[in-house]
Amino acid sequence: MIQIAPQMRIVAAIEPADFRRGIDGLARLCKDVLKHDPLSGWVFVFRNRSATALKILVYDGQGFWLCHKRLSSGKFRWWPTDKKGASKALAAHQMQVLLSAGNPDTAQAAPLWRPVGPVD
């Protein structure tokens, strides 16, 4: 299992990717379609057309990691949609829920940021 830290920037591609692509092909998708630099350290998440598998691409400063998760049965029922862009940002807790084939929109979590101070 890949460790997802709260400070990681995660982006999911809206359109399904061709899973015959390897690291170089997915890095090209990051540049051309998602308009992000694959060497930035961001976590890029791709889904196949049949919604049975995910690929995660991330650069760690020395090289690329490519993780592949295929469900033994069922599908990833939730996937982000956006009419305006080719990708959607995810929070770390949303990514963890997604990797468990859950729905990140219904997961309850603390807000990403809340002021620290005296309680009234």
Image (cartoon, rainbow, N blue to C red):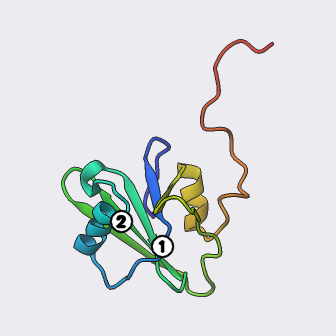
Q: Residue at x 58, y 51 (%)?
A: 93
> In the rendering, which numbered label is found on residue 33?
2
SS state under label 2: loop
Label 2: few (<14), some (14–19) or many (≥20) C-alpha neighbours in 10 Å: some
In percent of width and height, residue 107 lies at: 71, 55
**In the rendered view, would you say 117 is above or below 20?**
above
Q: Residue furthest right?
A: 120
Q: Which mark is residue 90?
A: none
Image coords of residue 41 (percent x, y): 31, 50
Residue 84 versus residue 109: which sits nearer the camera? 84
Q: Left or right of 63: which side holds 40?
A: right
Residue at the spot x=54%, y=58% of the render? 95
User: Mark 1 belongs to which amino acid?
Assistant: Glu
Amino acid type of the residue that numbered disc 2 sits on in the rendered structure: Val
Image quarter where the C terminus lies is top right
User: Residue placed at 56% from the left, 58% from the top?
Assistant: 96
- The crowding category of the residue bearing disc 1, from other C-alpha atoms within 10 Å (few below 14, some 14 to 19, many at least 20), is some
- Tell me the SS state at disc 1: loop
Whichever of callouts 1 and 2 sits on the residue coming sooner in the sequence is 1
For label 1, the residue is 15
The quadrant the N terminus occupies is bottom left
Q: Tell me whether circle 1 and circle 2 mark residues in contact (CB < 8 Å).
A: yes
Give how far across and how far down residue 63 sits, in percent: 20, 59
* Residue that extends furthest to the left in the rendered view of this protein: 62
Q: CA distance from mark 1 to mark 2?
A: 10 Å
Where residue 50 appears, as percent x and y from the top left, is: 53, 86
Give the left or right position of residue 27, taking residue 33 as reference: left
Total marks shown come to: 2
Give the residue at x 49% y 83%. Answer: 49
Q: Give 64 or 19, whichever is nearer the viewer.
A: 19
In the image, taking residue 90 as reference, residue 117 lies left or right, namely right
Between residues 78 and 4, which one lies in front from this camera angle? Answer: 78
